[in-house]
Amino acid sequence: MGGRLLSAADLAGLLKTSKARVLAYERETSVPEPARVLQIANIFNVNPRELYQARPAGHVDQIRDLRCYAGLTAAEFAKTIGLSRTTYRDIESLAILPARDDGTLPLKMASALGLPLGMIHRALDHHPAAAERRATIAAHLVEVFKRAEVIHHPALIDPDDEMLTRIAEQLRRPASVVCRLVNYDLGRYRDLLRRYEIAKVNIAYAQGGRETRARAREVEKLRGNIDRQPSAVASSQLRFLAEAMSSQQWRTLVDLPRRSGPMYDFGATLNDPNVRHIWNGLLARGFVKVERRLNSILSLSVTSYGLDICRNQRPCYACLYPRITAP
């Protein structure tokens, strides 16, 4: 510390513990709590990560690792982000977020740990259990997508289909919701097949070698997209459902531009707890922004990011909340 070597007794004094405890840490006969590791890291002015067991090359820190680096026990972290220990245990051991979350939980976790949101998503995405779920869903989708290859016949799946039931189990959502999502992706996959077949025909009608090569590259690109589609859809479905807004938030977001133009009197709703939590979630995720008018009225408007979400994810939200119409 500061270029000066510390004895076990010196370190014990700084940690306000016994010399025997420090020696036990050194001999690895006692494991310090995360808060103690953070305290030691601060004394030596190093990142807490350096005091934990070395990770193999390419290792991605898991939520448990990030929590420990912040000096928090599982119980402390769960309380900080407003979860029960059982629910939090599913996040840490299985990378499963609560189904009823409104999409703000990763933000709360990032804030509590003092980390960028991207690190939370990366930890969740690279969890072994998450990778296994993606692989399982992708394998089922390979079989389901074969239905799109049957021409002159609609590519559809029913809620009581055995394959659909297996996918719903992995996504932890009702079969009716998953059925709509899978049928939506079946339609997109079929359109991809149609474009692929058209691209192959275009090669036959190419006018010269340069055009032939360009058409061939297009065919190759489409073929790659087709091959990757089951894995891509599995990942996108898991991510969408994990981050999906609540039905109240989605209805509010799509209705906001209709309420007296693009602005909405926000200040009038601040005292209503039933409404405030909806705005708080939308604000936290950057979907809306607060603006103050000249007459001091607080108003809300949809951000460009919020508009992009409405446009890009509208079909998926239509599957999740079919009774809510979006522009």
Image (tube, rainbow, N blue to C red):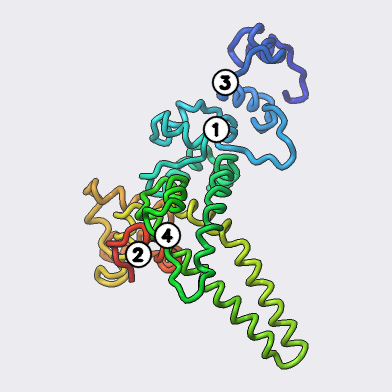
Q: Is 169 positioned to the left or the right of 205 in the image?
A: left
Q: Percent from the top left, x then y, of residue 71?
A: 55, 28
Q: Secondary structure at mark 1?
A: helix
Amino acid under disc 1: Arg
Q: Which residue was labeled with disc 4?
A: 181
Determine whether label 2 and label 1 are within 8 Å by CB. Answer: no
Which of pointers 3 and 1 lies earlier in the amino acid sequence? 3
Q: Earlier in the sequence, mark 4 or mark 2?
A: 4
Label 4, secondary structure: give it: helix
Can you identify the residue that label 2 sits on? 301
Residue under label 3: 33
| Residue type of the residue flagged with mark 2 | Ser
Q: Quadrant of the N terminus?
A: top right
Q: Which residue is mark 1?
A: 67
Q: Amino acid at mark 3?
A: Glu
Q: Secondary structure at mark 2?
A: strand
Label 4 CA crowd tier, 10 Å (few <14, some 14–19, many 20+): some
Residue 11 place in picture, x, y as percent: 67, 15
Return the residue nearer the eye: 82 or 157. Answer: 157
> Looking at the image, can residue 282 be seen?
no
